């Protein structure tokens, strides 16, 4: 069993739909990181959080430390949101990554 | 430049050769991270630097892999006696500190192909 599990592995949605990607982890962490990897390979940091909830534009990330679970939500999804979304848990400077969720948003 | 840069962008080498991959972090960023992503697979942590020291080298796959950082700036990842399983994209990231609230900025990666 991976230390960081993401679900679903693949997700296809219609433009405008509300998207939820889940991340569960089994190790002690200091913070959790959500990343976006574009089809060309470039990686962008979306959120780093250690408690509660953060919002940036149409993206919302939540974390429940007691349940060792985080969710990434995308409201009003758009084809440009199509990417791989990666959850990573951090312990000091070291990160352990989930396998990623491939999101495809169709117009 | 404004972002993290890596060179070369692509490297093709023969099995058994040594390679050096370079990372230039964002100016002023004291923390620097190396990751690897094999084709179709997830990201793997290799090593991180806080300043010029490496508190955690636990992700380096073997003693053929080493990394150094000088002047709290450029870092070099060296792979000796490359093997085909070393083929991957090697990504570098930097952050202001290694503290938990500090966002990491990723470079474009170096695609290494070992023939």
Image (tube, coloured by chain):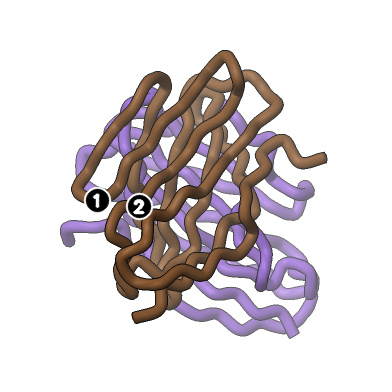
Chain colours: A brown, B purple
Picture disc at residue A43: none
Q: Distance between the residues labelled 2 and 1?
A: 6 Å
Q: Where is residue B113 in the image (x, y as percent from the top left)?
A: 65, 80
Mark 2, other Cα within 10 Å: few <14 / some 14–19 / many ≥20: many
Chain identifier of the residue bearing label 1 in the image: A
- Assign a secondary structure to mark 1: loop
Q: Say which quarter of the image contains residue B108.
A: bottom left
Residue plotted at (32% across, 41% down): A60
Residue where numbered disc 2 is placed:
A74
- Residue positioned most to the right: A1
- Residue positioned most to the top: A66
Residue plotted at (57% across, 14% down): A66
Residue plotted at (75% across, 85% down): B115
Relative to the observer, which residue lies in front, B45 or A55?
Answer: A55
Task: Return the disc, 2 or 1, that comes first in the chain's sequence.
Answer: 1
Cβ–Cβ under 8 Å for marks 2 and 1: yes
Q: In this view, does B106 lie above or below A22?
A: below
Q: Where is residue A73 in the image (x, y as percent from the top left)?
A: 39, 46
Residue where numbered disc 1 is placed:
A58
Q: Where is residue B89 in the image (x, y as percent from the top left)?
A: 57, 68
Mark 1, other Cα within 10 Å: few <14 / some 14–19 / many ≥20: few
Relative to the observer, which residue lies in front, B100 or A47?
Answer: A47
Q: In this view, does A46 lie to the left or right of B22?
A: left
For the N terminus of chain B, the image quarter is bottom left
């Amino acid at each position: 069993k991976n230390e960081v599990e993401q679900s679903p592995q693949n997700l296809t949605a219609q433009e405008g739909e509300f998207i939820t990607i889940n991340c569960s982890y089994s190790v002690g962490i200091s913070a959790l990181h959500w990343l976006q990897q574009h089809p060309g390979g470039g990686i962008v940091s979306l959120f780093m959080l250690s408690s509660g909830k953060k919002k940036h534009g149409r993206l919302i990330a939540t974390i429940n430390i007691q349940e060792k679970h985080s969710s990434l939500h995308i409201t009003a999804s758009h084809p440009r949101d199509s990417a791989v979304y990666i959850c990573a848990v951090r312990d000091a400077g070291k990160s352990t990554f989930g396998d990623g969720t491939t999101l495809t948003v169709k117009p | 430049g404004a972002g993290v840069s890596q060179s070369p962008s692509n490297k093709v080498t023969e099995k058994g050769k040594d390679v050096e991959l370079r990372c230039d972090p964002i100016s002023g960023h004291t923390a620097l991270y190396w990751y690897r992503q094999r084709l179709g697979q997830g990201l793997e942590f290799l090593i991180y630097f806080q300043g010029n020291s490496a508190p955690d080298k636990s992700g380096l796959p073997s003693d053929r892999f080493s990394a150094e950082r000088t002047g709290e700036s450029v870092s070099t990842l060296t792979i000796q006696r490359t093997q085909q399983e070393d083929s991957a994209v090697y990504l570098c990231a930097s952050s202001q500190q290694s503290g938990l609230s500090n966002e990491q900025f990723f470079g474009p990666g170096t695609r290494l192909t070992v023939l």
